[in-house]
Amino acid sequence: MHNSVQSVLPTLKAAGTTCRFVRHSRIDRLDKVVNTLAACHRRVWYLADGVYSMHGDVAPLAALRELQARHERLSLYIDDAHGVSWAGKHGRGTVLGDGAPAQRTVMVASLAKAFSAGGAVMVFPSAETARLVRTCGSTMIFSGPLQPALLGAAIASARVHLSPEINERQRKLMERIGLFNDLAVARGLPLGSAAATPIRFVRTGDNDTTYQIVSELMNDGFYVNSAVFPAVSASQGGLRIALTVHQTLDDIRALIDAIAKRL
């Protein structure tokens, strides 16, 4: 779970909320935790990412929906910041996809990533829930307006998302994601996830090795993120790569070659 989602936990605990951690995408463990908490609480919320920010794997949404069907007290809060724009109809993301918002599910997402603007979007299962958050949510109460430049960028981006151009951009990006994954497998690169998302992660191991490879790639003209502890588990570092439509297919081939040479 991204740090921005975890950061609310101390506030919740201070207010008397019972908080439990569940290991990454372990539906079996989540099922047991929900069973235990639902016996003594009217509401149980599960907080997660739609697309996990390090390895780029997608939340097990189908399994979560099935779990909701069995547990009437379970609600979902999913941060789809890394899923909007490149996925779903009109770029609605991995959580909303092409359908209507699901029951007992709140979807939030930053508009500062693939949407290329600022601010955020929040989708609620009912008008009453939206009213409650707007009226009582501390972040809403103490936030300020967006700068005019960001509003202009958001309007321009929204026009792209509502036009056929978004479909072509999504197609081009998926072509690059598919090429990266295929070449990585062919060259034996240890991917953090085989998911078809723009966030790609190549495992490198300890911090020193990761920093060395990132530095050498930079000297060759390839700029990637060094993902090391505490962003990931200790000694489980890697190269975090964000694919975009601005990279050519040849760029991706050359990057894979450069990484494979060093691994």
Image: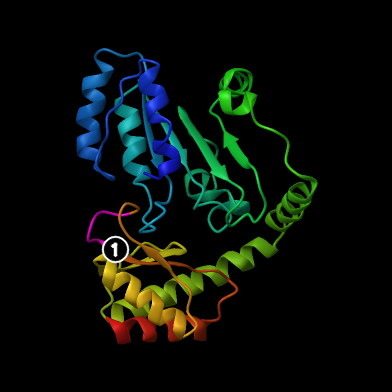
Q: Position of residue 162 (x, y in %)?
A: 71, 53
Q: Does 100 sit above or below residue 12? A: below
Q: Position of residue 232 (x, y in %)?
A: 31, 54
User: Please, what is the dominant secondary structure of the magenta stretch?
Assistant: loop
- Secondary structure, mark 1, is strand
Q: Position of residue 213 (x, y in %)?
A: 34, 77
8 left or right of 84?
left
Q: Which quarter of the rendering shows the C terminus?
A: bottom left
Q: Position of residue 6 (x, y in %)?
A: 39, 37
Crowdedness near tag 1: few (<14), some (14–19) or many (≥20) residues, C-alpha within 10 Å: many
Colour scheme in use: rainbow
Q: Does residue 233 belong to the magenta stretch?
A: yes
Instruction: Identify the residue shown where x is 37% and y is 73%.
Output: 181
Q: Amino acid under label 1?
A: Gly
68 left or right of 106?
left
Region of the chain picked out in magenta, as a range:
232-237
Q: Does 187 sit above or below residue 116? A: below
Q: Does 255 sit above or below residue 238? A: below
Write down the residue under mark 1.
237
Instruction: Identify the residue shown where x is 64% and y is 43%.
Output: 119
Q: Quadrant of residue 35?
A: top left
Q: Does residue 20 belong to the magenta stretch?
A: no
Instruction: Identify the residue shown where x is 40% and y is 77%.
Output: 215
Instruction: Identify the residue shown where x is 32% and y is 62%.
Output: 193
State the residue in front, 208 or 221: 208
263 left or right of 85?
left
Query: How many numbered circles are shown?
Result: 1
Q: Which quarter of the rendering shows the N terminus?
A: top left
State the residue in front, 213 or 103: 213
